[in-house]
Amino acid sequence: MKFPLRLLLIASIVALLIVASSQVVDGHSKNSTYTNPILPSWHSDPSCTFVKEWDNTAFCVTSTNAFERPSRMPELGSIVRQQHGLFAAMIQYHDNSFYVIVTLQSENNATGLIFTSPNLYDGTTWSMPTNFTMYGIDPDIFWEDDGKVYVSSNLYGTTIGLVVVDPVTGSQTTPTPIWNGTGGSSPEGPHIYKKDRYYYLMIAEGGTQLGHMETIARSTNITGPYEEYENNLILTNTNTTEYFRTVGHADLFQDESDNWWGVALATRSGQEHMSYPMGRETVLYPVTWKEGDWPTLQPVRGEMSGWPLPPINKGIPGAGAFVDDPDDYDFVPGSLLPLHFMSWRYLPTNAVIVSPHDNPHTLQINLSRANLTGDANSTDPTSFIGRRQTHTLFDFSVNVFFIPLLAEKEAGVTVFLTQYQHVDLGIVLLSSSSGTLTQFFRFRITSVWNDSSRGSSGREDECDLGIAPASIVSGGTGPYTGKYCTQIDVIEYLLITFSGALLGPYPTTNGGAGTTTAAYISEWRYEGAAQYVGNGEYVY
Ligand SMILES: *[C@@H]1O[C@H](CO)[C@@H](O)[C@H](O)[C@H]1NC(C)=O
Ligand SMILES: *[C@@H]1O[C@H](CO)[C@@H](O)[C@H](O)[C@H]1NC(C)=O
Ligand SMILES: *[C@@H]1O[C@H](CO)[C@@H](O)[C@H](O)[C@H]1NC(C)=O
Ligand SMILES: *[C@@H]1O[C@H](CO)[C@@H](O)[C@H](O)[C@H]1NC(C)=O
Ligand SMILES: *[C@@H]1O[C@H](CO)[C@@H](O)[C@H](O)[C@H]1NC(C)=O
Ligand SMILES: *[C@@H]1O[C@H](CO)[C@@H](O)[C@H](O)[C@H]1NC(C)=O
Ligand SMILES: *[C@@H]1O[C@H](CO)[C@@H](O)[C@H](O)[C@H]1NC(C)=O
Ligand SMILES: *[C@@H]1O[C@H](CO)[C@@H](O)[C@H](O)[C@H]1NC(C)=O
Ligand SMILES: *[C@@H]1O[C@H](CO)[C@@H](O)[C@H](O)[C@H]1NC(C)=O
Ligand SMILES: *[C@@H]1O[C@H](CO)[C@@H](O)[C@H](O)[C@H]1NC(C)=O
């Protein structure tokens, strides 16, 4: 059975829905089988909360943003460092409201932010955030019976700390360390669960790469002291031969039948751990947790079985696409940008128009001065709209209509991982050998990742790219003199990151003038072909 899930990109929050009515076969609920990852591609740091009041649905966040307009978080526009910004959010439902707590990490400064919404199906209902000071990353929010709100998080990079925060005013106590973990590096991603007589504190250790793992401790007092579980680790694929690696940053929740489940991040990178363009993905595993006992988390594989799951139900509210839906967008007049389309931080103001009057059925994207690489420390926004690469094998294509009039003006499609890692195929105006400005196809690989843990720098030479033939149909009508069709077919390439690849068009002046002109994108298509789950096995 296929796992029923839906990606709802409401106000950029990702909500996973598990509508948990048990499937009944021959009078018995049957255990389920499903395939990981349940949220393929860039869905790091998952957190889920199961809400009976909302039709027995599990809502999840991954490392995206809990707001739908820049005015809710203007600070994000001035973040320049690759690993800064918003990440590792946690979601909870309390007193008829959804809460999302997250850190905004900037240079030497982490701000804790608490957003609330009464209705995740309506992105306009998100509050402005309450903010407070953080002394580390990865906040968890926990309501004590006496009404106190505890926020645990990584503290000073070296331990797990606890503060009491007022989620309305942001006033807070000073942090106290509560657990150092079992000795792994980077104790982080804590979650506190109150069960039976105990507060269970589950954390990630070992760093988010190959040593990633989950450990747990418990106490009868939320402030500690915490007793370490003698059978730690409770979840890891470290030192195994599994294809799914870096498993950690987990969260646990219960379904309608009170069965426990967990989510975590994982990368499909195998023993080599070299090429995983889809980055850190969300996986699901069943958990057994008997009264008074420690939880048992089932190891993460591609093919899974566990507690009964409900049948697929795509009849749920929300305007977003399901995670496995293809893209088939013609930008019809009056339509909006699909909710799963993403930008890299904020887009330039007014740079994007769906179906403009003079060029209906296109997506008008104005050129940005900054290209996909940008200027190292500039906060200039980049004109780029993409969707996640959600399948190992896929087809992605758009039509690009573009008349460059100045040298270095360029528009095309990219497989974009970070500013330092992207593969671009564009139309660009350059001087020809005779000195006249001529349109060229330009294919560029930017790969300056420097992974010191492997002691190597850029590895462009190891890229293996397959690009389908590009056809040029000239003599178009209207304001265009040419029509260019570029297609990136199936791509295998060596790119590594915390994020995952985005596919989409990028128009840029490459640092020059001329940003008041536009490229016109039409016939946006994406179709997944297969997921690779290891051991030579593709799931179609
Ligand atoms: C931290 O960031 C917040 C939000 O951007 C800002 O208000 C505050 O002044 C900063 N604090 C320091 C010490 O830089
Ligand atoms: C935090 O709150 C202060 C005071 O309300 C505000 O000036 C600042 O912009 C906020 N910072 C963030 C990151 O929201
Ligand atoms: C964490 O380790 C430090 C250094 O060994 C120690 O001083 C501290 O008491 C430990 N904290 C906890 C909560 O165990
Ligand atoms: C928990 O520990 C704190 C700090 O030692 C103490 O003040 C508090 O009374 C304890 N709470 C309970 C319920 O025992
Ligand atoms: C994995 O193997 C390394 C090298 O032998 C060892 O240092 C580490 O403790 C192991 N980690 C786990 C979680 O088994
Ligand atoms: C059903 O799944 C749960 C969770 O993985 C497991 O504990 C249980 O043994 C399974 N039951 C059967 C009959 O396989
Ligand atoms: C960008 O800023 C970082 C941190 O301030 C600095 O180390 C680096 O040299 C700057 N790079 C450029 C190209 O200006
Ligand atoms: C890559 O990292 C190593 C080790 O930190 C450093 O010595 C080297 O200069 C870096 N190379 C580049 C191109 O940044
Ligand atoms: C991006 O633009 C800069 C000028 O701002 C240029 O030097 C650089 O070559 C461009 N890089 C790519 C990959 O387009
Ligand atoms: C975007 O480009 C169009 C077409 O050239 C132009 O009319 C419009 O003014 C530009 N918009 C911005 C915000 O630069």
Image (cartoon, rainbow, N blue to C red):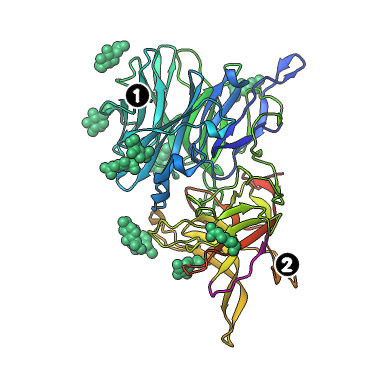
- Asked which secondary structure carries label 2, the reply is loop
Instruction: Residue 141 in the image: state x and y as whole percent.
Output: 41, 26
Q: Residues within 10 Å of mark 1 (few under 14, many from 20)?
A: some
Can you say which quadrant of the picture contains the C terminus? top right
Which amino acid does the dot numbered 1 rest on? Answer: Asp
Q: Which mark is residue 478?
A: 2
Can you say which quadrant of the picture contains the N terminus? top right
For residue 394, side relative to residue 196 (left or right): right
In magenta segment, residue 455: no
For residue 263, side relative to residue 189 (left or right): right
Question: How far separated are the C-alphas under marks 2 and 1?
Answer: 59 Å
Quadrant in the rendering for residue 4:
top right
Identify whether 18 is placed above or below 516: above
Instruction: Residue 266 in the image: state x and y as whole percent.
Output: 52, 41
- Asked which secondary structure carries label 1, the reply is loop
Which amino acid does the dot numbered 2 rest on? Answer: Gly
Instruction: Residue 171 in the image: state x and y as whole percent.
Output: 30, 27
Q: Residues within 10 Å of mark 2 (few under 14, many from 20)?
A: few
| Residue 457 visible at all | yes
Identify whether 155 is placed above or below 374: above
* Residue at horizontal 34 percent and vertical 26 percent from the top: 169
Q: Which mark is residue 140?
A: none
| Residue 184 visible at all | no
- Range of magenta residues: 397-408
Per the image, the residue denoted by label 1 is 166
Instruction: Residue 199 in the image: state x and y as whole percent.
Output: 39, 18
Q: Which of the two labelled residues, at mark 2 and mark 1, occupies the earlier sequence position?
A: 1
* Residue at horizontal 72 percent and vertical 52 percent from the top: 330
